[in-house]
Structure formats: C-alpha cells, structure tokens
Image (tube, rainbow, N blue to C red):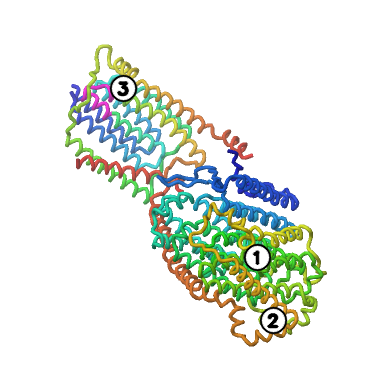
Amino acid sequence: MIPVEWSLALSAVLFTIGVVGVLVRRNALVIFMSIELMLNAANLAFVAFARQQNSLDGQIFVFFVMTVAAAEVAVGLAIIVNVFRLRETVFVDEINLLKG
Amino acid sequence: MNLPMLWIIPALPLAAVALNLLFGDRLGKKGTSFLACGAVGLAFAAAIRAVLTLAARSPEERQMVETAWTWFRVGDFSADVSFLLDPLSAIMVLVVTGVGFLIHIYSIGYMAEDPSFRRFFLYLNLFMFAMLTLVLADNYLLMFVGWEGVGLCSYLLIGFWHEKQSATDAGKKAFIVNRIGDFGFLLGVMFLIAWTGSVNYERVFAAAPHLFVAGGSIITLATILLFVGATGKSAQIPLFVWLPDAMEGPTPVSALIHAATMVTAGVYMVVRSHVLFEMAPATLEVVAVIGAATALMAATIGLVQNDIKRVLAYSTVSQLGYMFFACGVGAFGAGIFHVMTHAFFKALLFLGAGSVIYGMHHEQDMRKMGGLAGKMPITHLTMLLATIAIAGIPPFAGFWSKDEILAKAFATGHYGIFAAGLLGALMTAFYMFRLYVLTFRGKPRFEEHAAHGHADAHGHDAHAAHGAHDDHGHDHGHGGPVKESPWSMTVPLSILAVLSVAGGWVGIGKPFIHGESWMATWLEPVLGHGPHMKHLSAPAEFALMGLSVAVAAFGIFMAFRAYLQQPSIATAVRERFAGVHNALYNKYWVDEFYGAIAVTPIHQGAMRLWRFWDEKVVDGTVNGVGYVLEGVSALLRLFQTGYVGTYALFIAFGVLALFLHFLRS
Amino acid sequence: MVPYLFLGFAGLLIATALMVVLHKNPVTSALFLVLSFTSLAGIYLLLQAEFIGMVQIIVYAGAIMVLFLFVIMYLNLQHDVEKGAQIAVRRGIGWMVGALMLLFAGLIVRNGGFSPGPVQAVPPSLEGGNAQAIGRVLYSRFLFPFEITSILLLVAMVGAIVMIKGRPAADGAEGEKE
C-alpha cells in the first residue's frame, strides 16, 4: 500500500504549482486552470486520507468538490467572456474594476 | 352614581386644538373662532354641570375623583391621570372656563385683523387644556404637567408676534424665569414622593401628619420648595420680573394668562397644599412676608408707569402678593376668594385696556390718551366699574376679598403685614385711578401729541422702558377716528363688569349676615375651619372696613386731584422726589441687578465654555476621529488595487500563515 | 509494482502541471491540463477510488476541459506577452511564495502524525465494487447535500446563460430606464 505521506507530498506539490500559476500568470484563463489544479490537489488529499482511514467519506467529498468545480467553471468562464466583451482583454493586470 | 365626566372638560379644548391643527386651514376665520370658542363654551357648560352635581351632594361628600387611566407604575409608586373636583377646584374650573370663554369671544374681535388668527386660537385652546389639567389634577405630577403646559403656552403667546425682537425676548425671559420656579416645584414634589411615596393629594395629606413633625425642617423645606414654584408662576419676589415684560403678548393673552388664570396657579397650588403649609409655620411666615413685600413693591412701581398695560401688570403682581399673604396668615379661603374676584376685575381691566388700545390704533402710552370717556362709552363705563372694584369700594367685588384678607391679617396679629396691605391698598386706589383719569378723563392728548410731545409732563423719560406696544405689523397709523369697539369685545366687557360688581357678594360674611359667608361654607370641606383663626368682633370688623374704605377713597381723591384738577401737583411731587421717582420708574433696577448677577455671568461663562469646550474639546474630538479614520483608510486603500493578482497574493500569504500555524502546533 | 506506477503517475502529473503553468499558449496549457487530470485519475485508481477516477476523467478531463478549450478558441487569444519589469517582479514574488509554501508543506508532511483518528470507518465493500458502495452512501447519508448540489448546478447553469446572453439584456436595461 502506498504510504499516505507520498500522496500528501504529491498533493502539496500540485497545490504549490497551482499557487505559483495564479501568482505569476496574467491570463485569466490560465489562472482558472491553476485554480483547478489546486482543487485537484485538495481532492487528492481527500482520496489519500479516505484510503488511509478505510472510509468512503473522503471520496464523497471529492464528488461534491467536483460538482462545485463544475459550477464554478461554468460561472467563471461566463464572467471571463463578459469581461472580454467589455474590455477586449483577459489579462488580469489590465482589469481593475474592483478598485473603488 | 352618575359621574359628570370630568375628563371632558380639559378634553374639549384639546379636541379643538387637534381639529384646528388638522382642518384649520379650511375653516377660515369664522370657522376657527367658532371652533375655539365653542369648545371652551362647551367646557364651561360641562364644568357648570359637574359643579352643580357636586353642589347637590352633602358637604362632606363633595369630592369627585375620576381616574382616566394609570399613567405609569414603578414598583409601589404609581401616577394616574385622574381628575378631582372638590369645592376648591370647582371655583378654579368655573373661573378658568368662564373667564376664558369670555376672553375667547373678545379675542375674535381683537385679533380679527391678525394674519396669525388661527395660530392664536390654537395656542389659546392649548392653554385652556393645560390650565384645566392643572386645576383638575388629583395629584402633583399631573398638576405639574398642566403647570408646564401653561408655561409653554405662556411662552408661545408672549412671543406670539415673533417677528418683534422684544416679544421673543420677553417670551424667553418668562420661560427661563419660570424654569427656576418650576425646578423648585419639581424638587418639592420629589421631596413628597421620597417621604410619602405618593403624589396623590389625598394620600400625601393623609400621610403628612404621621410622617412629618409639624414645624420640622423636612416639611419646611418641602413647602419652601413648593412655594419657590409658586413664586415663579405667580410672579412673586424674587421671580416677578417676567410678568411685566409678558405684556408684549396680545392683550387678551395678558388678560387670560397673565391676570386671570395662569398666574393664580401658584396661589391655587399653595391653597391646595394647605395641609402641608399649615404644618410649617416658618414657611407660612415666609409666604406672608414675600406676599406683602411683593404687594407693596409692585404697587410703588405701578405708581409711575406710563404704559397702560404695564400699570396693570404691576397691579397684577401686587394683587397676587395680596393673595399670597392671605395664604401666609392662614386665610387660604380669602386667598382663593381674591383669586376669583381678581380674575373678574383684572380680566375686565385688561380687556378694557385692550379695547382702548384697539380704539386708539395700538397706542399704549397713557400720556397720549385722555378724554376717551365720551368716545368709548361702554369701555369707559366697564373700566370705571373695574377700577372701583380693584380700589376696594363697597359693594364692589374687590372690596370684599381685599377686606377679608386685611381683616384676617389683622386678626391673626400680623400687624406689620396688615399695615403693608393697607398701604398697598392706598397705592392701588391711587394708581388705578391715575390710569382711569389719564385714559378717560381730561382733554384728549392724542391729536396734538405731535406738537406738544416733548413739552408734555413726562416727555423726557419717554425713551425709557415702555416697549410693550401692541403693534403687530398692521400699521393703522395714529390717525382715524377713535370709536367704540365691536360687540364681540363689548359684550364680554359688560358681562365681566357685572361680575366685577356682584362677584364679591358670595363672600359677604360676618358681620353683615349671621354665620359664615357662602364662600367660606363652600370651601369648608376642603380647607376646614382654619386652626388658629379667631374672629374679630363686629365693631372691629366695621372699623377695619371703614379704615380700608377711607384709605381707598383718599387714594382716589389724590389721583383725581393730582392728575385731573391740578396736574402741577404731580409734576411738583415728581421733581421734589426725583431720585425716588427714578428708582420707581426703573423698577428698582431689578432687571439690571439680575442681569449683572445672573444673566451676564452665565452668558459669559457659556461663551467661554462654547469657545473652549465645544469648539476645542467636542469639535476637536469629533474632527480628530475623522482625521484618524481618514489617515488609516488612506493606508488601507493602498491594499485595494483592483487587480485580482494582488488579492491572490494576499490569499497566498494567508495560506502561508495557516501553514505556519500547523507547523507550530 | 503499485509504488512504481504511483511514482510514474506522480512524475507525469507534476510535469504536466508545470507545463500548464509555464506554457505561453493557453491552448497548450489546457491540453497539458487534460493530461495532468488523466494522470491524477490513474493515481485515484491506485488509491482504490475507482469511481472517483472515472468521474475525474469524465467530468474534468472531458466536460470541464472542453469548456475551457471552447472558450479559449471562442475568444481567439494570442500567445501571452509576458515582459516588463512589473511582470518580472510578480513572477519573482510568485515563485518565492511558491517555494516557501512547498517548504512549509513538506515540513508538515514530514512531521507526519496522520494516524487514523476516531472516525468510525465504513470499509469500502468490495463486493459490487467501489461505485456501488459510493452510491449506497450518497443516496442514504448524503442524500440531502446531494440534492443541494443539483440545485447548485442549476443555479450555475442559469447564471452562466444569463451572463453570456449579454446584448439583449442591455436592451432590457434600456427598457427599465424608461
């Protein structure tokens, strides 16, 4: 059986890659993909713990996280498309509508 | 038991106020006056019905209490909105509604051309409501509500012509001076609550003999505090200064509030609390001395004033002094009797003066009148009757009450006060007939006053304080013929004249009839016999009456002599005693004195507080908070770049912090 | 055998994830993302989560990534231009934060202590397979959250459609102004 630490280390690496992606990229779509990476890192940790604890609950949680991710992607991509229509860009450092 | 619905008496004027507020702009002048006078007239009718019900009972049962609702209840203490009708409040309620009704009718004529006609009746009705609450209340707290209510209406009506600076100033003065008195009254009531646990008259009076030592310091302090309230409302020394200035208000207001009803509230309160006052002889002495001093002092000032309303104002202060020293010598019944007769003749005098002012196109200076007897016959006749009444000539109303007061003072051995009262009576007769002569007799001085103005006897102090001109923006000019006032003014005058003549007859007692007077019998269930009231023998009574009549007659004679037959006498006396005249004319500089010791220091202290505390500390704190927030938010705003990347970075920092937390634990 | 498979999938996953983040062309990034999701599904299989592995491929690698690619192509994007001092600073900070995070996470993992807690374990019953077991739990203990997710998806769908509709909504806004 694979030790849980392996999975967790992999999850940590994946998460960090996601974080780096969010921080260094300026394309909103790539940032979105990086967020998906982070979600998957969390999923991996869930599955690993489910395996370690011999329980199904972790897998159920992954199922829910996937649902939320699907919803989030649908809405998020709609927002990006709208922003692109308005601003002709998907580069987040050219969009500062949030500034009051 | 068929209760006569006491609550309806104050409720009627209040309903008129509400209707006037809601629909007054659609009613027009006729509708407004009909509404206002109708409400007061109905209240008068309701009062008569209630008093008749009361009179039908046997003397011991003459007391009706009607609780409308419980106002509030705190622990054991409760205050009700409940009304009490007993012989004492019966007299007051009849006088208030009756005289009030007449004055309302009079106001229709007097205020006819005023643009604020509706507002006037609004205030007047509100005053009636407050005054009736005051006299009908069955506890001190509700009485205080009415007490403050009449104070408010007094303020509003004195400053009725608010575009005039002197009127608003007078209103403020009245209000502030009254506050001092009200504070004393409130403290007194709190005293009673603290010691008896109740504000209800009956319970307080029942508990008082068990709780207080007669003549002890507690009861003395409590009654002194109550009396302070009375000095404020009833314009006694040292708080009398507001009443003469209150003449800035319209004349019907002066008649109703500042002569007939509100200013007697203090007397009513003292008489109502007679059980307490009788337990505190020291307070009674104070009341008697202050009353007598006020009576004398106001009378001396009244001798030299030239403004017709001011003379009457000082006369009112003086007569109120009589009422108080009657209470002070223990003759509470005599005090209330004088309240009643005074309401009749002083209301008449004020309304007559108003009629003269109206006829003279808003001229109030008596030196510019004269010879009006032929031109205003009804006003002249009624005024003459009232003047005789106040001077104290039998069988007019004023004689009976004033004589009873003097006799009681003499009988109880207060000889100094008796002498002061007698001297006051002399001066009253003199200044009232001076007013009468200057106004109605002699040659008219108003048509040639432009030519002879400064050659006139009083000409050179004309610039001094006589600011009370009933001029409210309608400049009728001083031309036009002087003519009699309309019926709405003369009819109330005539009715009041009848009362001024006959109103005192209810007080005729020994030695003319066998037994007590009708008035004394009526009040007996409330006031009792009076503990130490001994009766004089019939010859002594007659001697005292003769003395006071002689004094009054002498005063009248002097007035005619000095102002009608030989005006040189008045001039000579004035020049001989120029210093005294100056002191009197300037009202002993009491206003200036108060200004120096109280008004100016407070004003300056307030200015300093404003400059330092308000501007530096309070504003500084508020602005400081603003500056700090501004600075902090300017810093915080740096974090809000609007770029998603920055926010993501902050989130990453947060995640790092969480990781650190897990590492440490 | 299994550990080697795991290491292989893990290496593939890390490599493709790095490519997602680093590649200039978003289309390429998306395709690498598909590959990384697929290798993650392999890891799920190794961890005896067969159902999740399948769903991972169907939902993530299938549906979500198709959506991404569709949007990228709809927007017709060029290669990202990543130049300039400001962007350099951002990259520096980003990598530094990433390194720090990896260090902390590694330390946490190394500290260990991931022993089974007091959780009442429901053993994945192998008869009928993992999917049947998940279905049984999902429709009993987690029925209510499961139903809620359907509402969530409905809301997301409606929201996305409303936002994308765009221009006709602007006419509606003008109508509201009147």
Q: Are marks 3 and 2 in contact (CB under 8 Å)?
A: no
Q: Secondary structure at mark 3?
A: helix
- Sequence-wise first label, 2 or 1: 1
Q: Are marks 1 and 3 in contact (CB under 8 Å)?
A: no
Residue B89: x %, y % from top left: 58, 52
Question: Residue at label 3?
Answer: C52
Q: Are marks 2 and 1 in contact (CB under 8 Å)?
A: no
- Marks 2 and 1, Cα distance to the nearest angstrom? 31 Å
Which residue is at 17% across, 34% downward? Answer: C112
Judge depth for marks 3 and 2 and give the one in front.
2
The chain identifier of the residue carrying mark 2 reads B
Residue B473: x %, y % from top left: 72, 65
The chain identifier of the residue carrying mark 1 reads B
Residue C71: x %, y % from top left: 45, 32
Question: Residue at label 2?
Answer: B458
Q: Which mark is residue B398?
A: 1
Q: Which mark is residue A31?
A: none
Judge depth for marks 2 and 1 and give the one in front.
1
Which residue is at 52% across, 42% downward? Answer: B69
Q: Could you say which is closer to the camera, residue B174 or residue A77?
A: B174
The chain identifier of the residue carrying mark 3 reads C
What amino acid does circle 1 point to?
Answer: Gly
Which residue is at 36% across, 26% downward? Answer: C61
Q: Magenta region's main secondary structure?
A: helix
Range covered by the magenta-colored residues? A44-58
In the rendered image, the vertical position of residue B21 relative to residue B491, given as above or below? above
